[in-house]
Amino acid sequence: MWSLASLAAFVGAAVAIVLGLVTVGVQATAGPRGLPVAVAVPDSAPPPLHVAAEHVAQQGGGALAWRITTPDEARTMLDDKDVYGILEPGNPATIVVSGAVNPAGTQIVQQALTTAASATGGPVRVETVHPATTAARTAPLAASILAWLGSLAAGAVALVLAKRSGRTLNLAARLARVLGSAVLMTTVLAGFFKLWDSSLPLGWDVLGFIFLITAAFAALQGALLRLLGLAAMAVLAPMYLLAPAVAGQVPEMLNPAYRTALWSWTPFRFSTEGLRSIMQGTPGAPDVTLALWVLGAMLVVGLVVVLWPGRSTPKVAEPDAADRVVEVGVH
């Protein structure tokens, strides 16, 4: 019993270490490091304005990474999420941010640009392109979390019920589980979006992308559950904690170690940022194309594993009738 108690204590400590590193540790070490921003001045602007732009670009230290460009190019970069905010010097100075950009990055950048613009001593105004409501800022990340948990619960329940009945899920059942989860979770998420804010866009582009997210998650989870059984839950269940801790931040806010080890591969960042761009009217942003490729690959690979024919159990041949032992009763 002492051995069991010691083992349990060590397992608890190990779990705390892992979860502390991938969740609390991410937030505890977060801070702006080279957030990309632009200072925009027209080519035809008078020389003093260009000098002011050069001066502004020296502000922020290592927290900001400035790019000096024209207003049109800067707004294109903002739509593509190459920058998180724009400062247009003048009287008044204009700060341009976008509702299609991760709100965590937008908030930090807006504060930093306001401080930089205030150094000129003139008035400052803020302009928001693709404005987003509170629900619109929350929905993309919430959709990723709920899609992951909902499809994971469906996969685990299907596996447990099949084991209790002494059977194995056949190909049709595995496919039905993936597609059923995708359809139902898409419906659930669409209902939540309407409940949270009836103005949220729910066109075929948004619904189709949500379906791709849920189907990709369900296929990936189904593949791991088929390969590892319920042991896969030890990996899949804690993974949803990476969504708010890692995917909820822009990469420039993360410690470089976490950016490489977690942010670079977590599926939640692709689904969250891709859905945000589509919902906020920037479907041409590079993160949408990247998300389509990554989620599509997850779906294809997951379905291949889920639908791959299993090994059939060979039947043991019964002995011929001539070889059988027949009991004969003697009276």
Image (tube, rainbow, N blue to C red):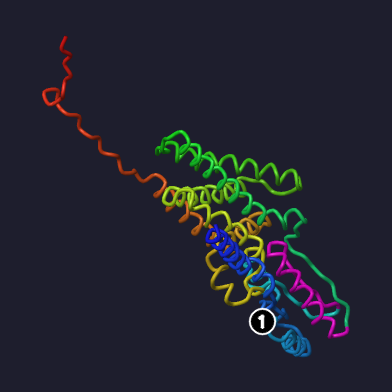
Quarter of the figure with residue 102: bottom right
Q: Please give left or right for residue 184 compared with residue 327 in the image.
A: right
Q: Residue at x 42, y 36 (%)?
A: 172
Q: Is residue 232 visible?
A: yes
Q: Residue at x 69, y 41 (%)?
A: 191
Quarter of the figure with residue 310: top left
Q: Residue at x 72, y 64 (%)?
A: 103
Q: Please give left or right for residue 16 compared with residue 218 in the image.
A: right
Q: How many marks?
A: 1
Residue 5: x percent and y percent?
A: 57, 59
Q: Is residue 288 visible?
A: no
Q: Which residues are magenta?
A: 92-121
- Residue 278 vs 79, above or below: the answer is above
- The amino acid sitting under disc 1 is Ala
Residue 62: x percent and y percent?
A: 68, 85
Residue on which the image places disc 1: 65
Residue 252: x percent and y percent?
A: 64, 75
Q: Residue furthest left?
A: 322
Q: Any magenta on residue 213?
A: no
Q: Any magenta on residue 109?
A: yes
Front residue of this view, candidates 86 and 268:
268
Front residue of this view, candidates 188 and 57:
188
Residue 301: x percent and y percent?
A: 42, 53
Q: Residue furthest top?
A: 331
